[in-house]
Image: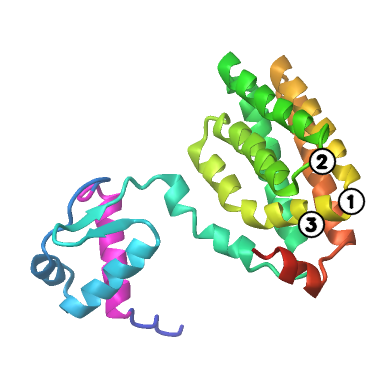
């Protein structure tokens, strides 16, 4: 059996702080021990400690405050899962459908859960979002505004699922979905009205409080986006025009 490669000192720092968090020695909002003490505790140099701390800060685990020290963040899922957005942004032609497939699984489940947890106030808020889309469709629709509103509708459902980690995953994976929908809307203006109808069908099941039908409606909706993305891959000109 091959020997396990020795960990670098920054990796020792990352693992050490992770252990301190999982054992409860450090908690959300806590200030890390002073640099000299923490370096000695972990058996690393101060330079390696800084590298490890910097890596954890990039991941949203730690927050270094100039002149005040380093603190554990709130460890909110939306922060810790945000690097997944990079995965969405780096998808290449042919692989965006895989991401949409994951999104379909997650969003279908979030819709089912939301059907059981949405308050009357939250349902009214979702209805107002769709009402604003109706107003846009009655005019010369601003595609970017439409996509932003579409994202708000999906985000509201995910947040109502009662699972912050699930909502954060869906939000983090939204980058590529955003571009797929934008491209779809630009190349097939009829999809704006179609998408609105699908949203209304989803909302109807949420209002009824029917988890299974809400799950099916959401799954069909995302599947439509997925199939369109597969059959209409973006050209280099599309990517250059809409990457911003």
Q: Name the residue under label 1.
A: 188
What kind of colouring is applied to the model shown?
Answer: rainbow
Residue 184: x, y in percent? 82, 53
Q: Name the residue under label 3.
A: 183
Tell me, yes or no, if residue 209 can be seen here: no
Q: Main secondary structure of the magenta part?
A: helix
Q: What element carries label 2?
A: loop
For marks 1 and 2, give the CA distance: 14 Å
Which residue range is magenta in the image?
8-26
Q: Which of 212 and 228 is in front in this view?
A: 228
Residue 149: x, y in percent? 67, 38
Q: Which residue is drawn at 77% across and 70% down?
A: 93
Q: Is residue 13 covered in magenta?
A: yes
Q: Is mark 3 on a helix, strand or loop?
A: helix
Tell me, yes or no, if residue 231 can be seen here: yes
For marks 3 and 2, give the CA distance: 17 Å
Which one is earlier in the sequence, the residue at label 1 or at label 3? 3
Q: In which quarter of the image is residue 54?
A: bottom left
Q: In which quarter of the image is residue 51?
A: bottom left
Q: Nearer the viewer, residue 154 or 81?
A: 154
Residue 163: x, y in percent? 52, 35
Which one is earlier in the sequence, the residue at label 1 or at label 2? 2
Residue 140: assigned label:
2
Residue 198: x, y in percent? 82, 33
């Amino acid at each position: 059996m091959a020997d396990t490669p020795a960990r670098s000192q920054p990796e020792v720092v990352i693992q050490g702080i992770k252990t301190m968090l999982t054992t409860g020695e450090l908690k959300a909002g806590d200030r890390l021990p002073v640099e000299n003490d923490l370096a000695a505790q972990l058996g690393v140099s101060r330079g390696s400690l800084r590298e490890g701390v910097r890596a954890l800060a990039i991941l949203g685990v730690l927050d270094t405050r100039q002149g005040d020290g380093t603190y554990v963040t709130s460890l909110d899922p939306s922060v810790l899962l945000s690097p997944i957005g990079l995965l969405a942004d780096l998808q290449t032609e042919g692989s965006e459908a895989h991401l949409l497939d994951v999104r379909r699984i997650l969003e279908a489940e979030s819709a089912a859960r939301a059907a059981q947890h949405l308050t009357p106030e939250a349902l009214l808020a979702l209805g107002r979002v769709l009402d604003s889309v109706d107003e846009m469709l009655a005019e010369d629709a601003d595609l970017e505004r439409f996509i932003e509103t579409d994202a708000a509708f999906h985000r509201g459902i995910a947040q109502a699922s009662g699972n912050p980690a699930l909502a954060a995953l869906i939000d983090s994976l939204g980058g590529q979905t955003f571009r797929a929908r934008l491209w779809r809307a630009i190349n097939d203006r009829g999809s704006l009205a179609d998408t609105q109808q699908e949203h209304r069908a989803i909302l109807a099941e949420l209002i009824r409080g029917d988890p299974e039908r809400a799950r099916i409606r959401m799954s069909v909706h995302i599947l439509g986006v997925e199939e369109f993305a597969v059959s209409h891959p973006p050209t280099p000109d599309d990517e250059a025009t809409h990457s911003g």
